[in-house]
Amino acid sequence: MARPKKCRKVCSMPSNTGFAPSILGICCPTVTMTVDEYETIRLIDLEEMTQGECAGKMDIARTTVQSIYISARKKLADCLVNGKMLKIEGGDFRVCGGNDLACKGSKCCQKNDEN
């Protein structure tokens, strides 16, 4: 029997929930990225965290971060190379309220404070 999925912690919901190539008037295929995939891209590529640091922030195992990150990068590449629209929604996650120990004194939940 498989283990139940652990809820992944994200700092905030994405402010942009999609991206589309500039092909006006043409309907293109859509790729859906989950919010937890978005969060791994944000933490690893934008915030320049290691997979281990990302795992700590998201409260999941490093190996889980690795598989989420690989999936997210593949989706981004598909959108860029094949001109597909990207939509960000869904996934197994909970939004951090800024009260977790991992968030104290860091940039985590900075977006939540601004909203």
Image (cartoon, rainbow, N blue to C red):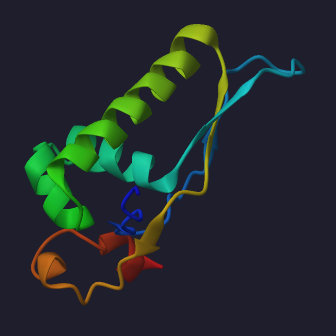
- Note whether residue 49 is visible: no
Residue 100 occupies quadrant: bottom left
Q: Is residue 77 left or right of residue 59?
A: right
Q: Is residue 35 above or below residue 25?
A: below
Residue 27 position, x and y percent, is 86, 22
Q: Is residue 114 left or right of residue 100?
A: right
Give the residue at x 24% y 38%: 45
Q: Is residue 54 above or below residue 72?
A: below
Give the residue at x 30% y 72%: 110
Residue 83 position, x and y percent, is 64, 14
- Note whether residue 31 is visible: yes
Residue 64 position, x and y percent, is 27, 48
Residue 95 occupies quadrant: bottom left
Q: Is residue 3 above or below residue 105?
A: above
Q: Is residue 93 left or right of residue 28?
A: left
Q: Where the N terminus falls, by quadrant?
A: bottom left
In terms of depth relative to the viewer, which is nearer, 2 or 107? Answer: 2
